[in-house]
């Protein structure tokens, strides 16, 4: 939990860090999703191949 009183610069720095962490998590999720979609497409292609 955040302290009640912080100066503006501290808040900006903290929010920037949180934003960077969120962006990093989003990129990781996107990569896992891409990997999963690619894997599923590959399986479908294998099933369709004679």
Image (spheres, helix red, strand yellow):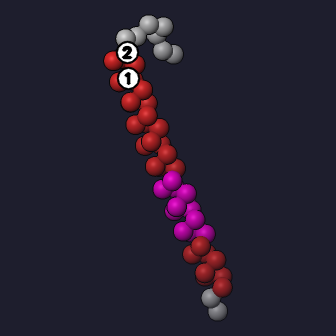
Q: Main secondary structure of the magenta part?
A: helix
**Residue 8's mark?**
2
Query: How many other residues sit within 10 Å of disc 2, few (<14), some (14-19) or many (≥20)?
Result: few
Q: What residue sits 37% from the left and 15% below the top? A: 8
Pointer 1 residue: 12
Q: Is residue 48 found left or right of 30 in the rendered image?
A: right
Q: What residue sits 49% from the left and 45% below the top? A: 26
Distance from Cα at disc 2 to Cα at disc 1: 6 Å
**Mark 2 vs 1: CB contact within 8 A:** yes
Tell me where residue 23 sits by quadrant: top left
Q: What residue sits 55% from the left and 57% below the top? A: 33
Name the image quarter holding the C terminus: bottom right
Q: Secondary structure at mark 1?
A: helix
Between 12 and 36, the residue placed more toward the observer is: 12
Q: Where residue 32 appears, x then y in whole percent? A: 52, 55
Range drawn in magenta: 30-40
Query: Is 33 inside the magenta-drawn segment?
Result: yes
Q: Is residue 25 above or below residue 8?
A: below
Query: Is 35 inside the magenta-drawn segment?
Result: yes
Q: What residue sits 42% from the left and 26% below the top? A: 15
């Amino acid at each position: 939990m955040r302290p009640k009183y912080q100066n503006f610069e501290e808040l900006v720095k903290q929010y920037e860090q949180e934003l960077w962490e969120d962006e990093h998590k989003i990129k990781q999720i996107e990569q896992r999703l891409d990997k999963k979609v690619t894997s599923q497409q590959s399986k479908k292609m294998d099933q369709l191949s004679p």
